[in-house]
Amino acid sequence: MNRRSLLAGVGGLLAASGVASSGLLATPAAADPVSRPERDGRVEALLRKMTLAEKLGQLQLLGNEADARTALATGQLGGVFSVVGAAKLNALQHIAVEQTRLRIPLIFGLDVIHGYTTNFPIPLAQGSSFDPAVAGADASVSAKEARRSGIHWTYAPMMDVTHEPRWGRIAEGYGEDPYLATKLAVSKVRGYQGDDYSSPDRLAACAKHFVAYGGAEGGRDYNTVDVSLQRLHNLYLPPFKASVEAGVATVMASFNTISGVPAHGNGYVLHDVLKGSYGFRGFVVSDYTGVQELILHGLAGDGADAAAAALPAGVDMEMVSTNYVQYGQQLLAQRRITNDQIDDAVRRILLVKFKLGLFDRPYVDEAGEVKAPSPVALAAARQAAGRSMVLLKNDGPVLPLAKTVRSVAVVGPLGTATYDLNGTWSGLGTGAATTPPVTVVDGIKAAAPGATVTYSAGCTVDGADTSGFAAAQQAARAADVTVVVVGETAAMSGEAAARSTIDLPGVQQQLVAAIKETGKPFVVVLVNGRPLTIPYLHDNAPAILEAWAPGVQGGNAIADVLFGTVNPGGKLPVSFPRAVGQIPIYYNHENTGRPADPANKYTSKYLDLESGPLYEFGFGLSYTTFRIDGLRLSDTRMSSRGGRIQVSAKVTNTGGRAGDEVVQLYLRDPVATIVQPVRRLRGFQRVTLAAGASTTVTFTLTPDDVGFYDNAAKFRVEPGKIEVYVGNSSAATLTSSFTVT
Ligand code: BGC
C-alpha cells in the first residue's frame, strides 16, 4: 500500500504550556467527564433527525480525496484520513458542511506518530527515556502543529507491548513492559488532548492497536496471536485501560486474531472489555481495511458477513473498506444487526465530533497552517532525543569526546543519513521534505568547530560491497577518534517490516571490524528501530551509544551526547537478545520449574548459548556513576483492602560529573495462584544529580501494584509475601519484602 509520503517536513508552532521538571513541555491532566454535548442533548437531537443512510455514512472513513468527494456526493462520509493541507481539508469540509442535508462536519485523521513537521525520536526511543514528559512533549508539539494545519485526530499513541524484536512495529511502541508503556502512553494521550480537545492546539488521540498486536507469532506483521486471558489482561491491556481512564477519544482495532477471533470481530475485547468493563465512551475505528480482512481471516464469507461481525462486536467506524455503508441496510432488514447497534456507533462518532468543537468551528484558519518546525519545537525534539539515548558500553572511558579534539573521522553508511534518522512514520505533515534531519556529520561539526571532520561511508546499510573499507580505514588512521554510525534504514522497521534476523544488516559488522583493525580509538553509534543482536560489538567496540531513530535533530542530539553536553541517562525499554534464536526473551517472564542453571543440564536453557539477554531491560550507563542504597519500606504489611506502602531508597552520584539515573522498582510475588513474572516493574523515577549529590526516591505501592488478573479476567490481590527489588535495571539486587494481608 503506497499511501503515505515518506518525508518529514518543516513547520511548527509551539507555545510551552508549562515546564516540567525535566525541562520538557508539561502535559496537562485530562479526564473523561460527561461532556457538554452529552448533557445538553445535541447528540441525541441530531441522531433523531438522521436517516439510516446518513447514519451509515457517519460510520465511513476514507483515505484519499477522490474517494472522499465521491462519497460526499451521496452524503455518506464520516471522516477522511491521510489528506494533508489546510486548504484541501477546508475544501472537503465545505462540501460536508454546506452541501449535505444535516451539515455534519467531517473528522480529519492522520498518523501523527512522533511528529507532524517536527519529528521527535521514535516511540521506542522515547520509552528509553523512562520519562513520560518526553512522550508528552512530542504529543503537545505534534498536536499544535497538526491541529493548526486542519487535522483533528491522530492515530497515536501506539501502545502495543511486545516481546518481539523481529516485529518492525516494535519501533512504534514503548517496548516489553506494560507498566512503562502505560506511563508513556497516558502522558502522550494527555499531551495530544489536553483537558479539552476542542482547543485549537489539541488533537483527539487514538489508542492502538486493540489488542495484543505485539504478540504476532514469529514477529511477522499481522500474524496470529493466541493468548491466555491472564496474559491478555496483565500484559497487553493495561496501557489501554489506563488510556481510557485518561479520557482517550478513540481506539483502533488491531489486525491480528486473538485466540482465534480477529480483533475486528472480537466482541469480547471490544464490546465486553473496552466498552463494557472499561466504560469507554469514545468510538472504535477499524484499522486499514480491517473489516474487509475478516473475509481472508476466515471469520466472514463475504462483505455483508464481515459487517455483520464487526459492528456488533464493537467496531464503530470502518476505515477504507465500505461494508457498513454497502450492506448496513440489508443487514438491518435481515436482523443481523440492530438499530441500537447502529445508533450506538453513530452516537459515539458524533460525540467525538462535538467534543472536537467541529460543529461550532468546522474550518481551520489557512493562514495558521504549520509548514516548518519552530525553534522551540526543534529544541524540544533535540532535548527529547538526548534523553532517549542509551549508553550500552564505554570502556576506557572513550566517551565523552573532548570538544577540543583535533580530528574526527565519521565512518558508516548512516553518518550522513537524513530521513533515516526519523525512522518509521516520519513527518506526514505539510511542508514535507523541506527540513531533512541534521546528519551526524553536521552535528559533530557544530559541536567541535575546531576539529577536522571527515566522512567515509565504508559500505551501504544492507549491501555486500566491502570496497569502501580501505578508505574508511585510512580515514580512521588519520583521525584522533572515529565515530562509526551503523544500524538500520527507516524502512527496516515499522509496519510490514519484520526481519528474520536482527543482526546489523549487510557488511556493517565487518566495517566495524575493519575500523577495529586500525588500532585507533573508536565509538559505535547505533541508529535503529528495534533491538539488534550485537554481541560482536559488545566484545569489540570500546563504546556503544544506542541512538535509535532520533528524529529531526538527530545529528545534533547524538553530538550532544558524544561530547558530553548531554550525559546519557536512557535505559533499555526492551531486552537485547544475544541471538535471534532466544526470542522471545523478556525480563518479566515466568519461572519454569527448572530455571536455567549452567551446572545442570536439565534446566531451561540452550546448549549453545549463554542464558539471559546481552543487555537487560532497564539497563543503561552514564558518564558518571551512581550508588543506590538505604532501601526502606514504611511497613512490613499491606492490607489487600486499601493498604499502602512507601518504598524509598537513596541515590548518590558517586562520579565526577552531573548525570541522570533512573531508579527502578520491581516486585515479585513468589507464590500465587497464577505464577507471576520473576520481576515486574512497578515504579521508576529519573533523577538528575550533580557530582557528589544524593537524593531519596520514594515510591508508593497499593494493592493495584501487587495484584494480577487471573484466567477469568478477575483482578486478584492474594495474601502472602511480596519481594521488592530496587536498582538501576531489571537486574536490581537491593531487596526487601513485605506481606499482603
Ligand atoms: C496501520 C495503522 C494506521 C493506519 C492508517 C494501518 O496500516 O496499521 O497503525 O493508523 O494504517 O494509516
Image (cartoon, grey):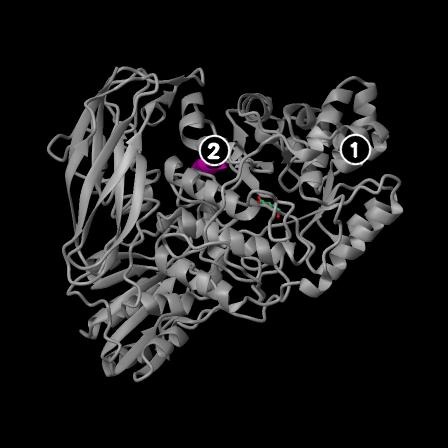
- Image side of residue 150 versus residue 74, left or right: left
| Quadrant (top left/top right/bottom left/bottom right) for the C terminus | top left
Mark 1 Cα shell of 10 Å, populated few (<14), some (14-19), many (≥20): many
Identify the residue at horizontal 65%, vertical 45% (top origin): 198
Q: Which mark is residue 27?
A: none
Q: Write the start and end of the magenta stretch as one range.
A: 213-217
Left or right for 299, reference 466? right
Disc 1 is placed on an element classified as helix
Q: Are marks 2 and 1 in contact (CB under 8 Å)?
A: no
Q: Taken as a whole, is the magenta stretch helix, strand or loop?
A: helix
Q: Position of residue 157 (x, y in %)?
A: 52, 44
On the picture, is 547 further left or further right than 339? left
Disc 1 within 8 angstroms of ligand 1 (CB): no
The number of discs equals 2
Residue 334 in the magenta stretch? The answer is no
- The image position of residue 226, as x and y in percent, is 47, 27
Percent coordinates x, y for residue 363 in the rendering: 75, 53
Kindly tell me whether residue 506 is visible in this rendering. no
Does residue 214 show up magenta in the picture?
A: yes
At label 2, which amino acid type do we have? Ala
In this picture, is 498 found above or below 632?
below
Q: Nearer the viewer, residue 188 or 322?
A: 188
Ranked by sequence position, the earlier of labels 2 and 1 is 1
Quarter of the rendering containing residue 657 = bottom left
Residue identified by numbered label 1:
56
Residue under pointer 2: 242
Q: Residue at x 56, y 60 (%)?
A: 427
Q: Position of residue 191 (x, y in %)?
A: 51, 48
Mark 2: few, some, or many residues within 10 Å (few <14, many ≥20)?
Answer: some
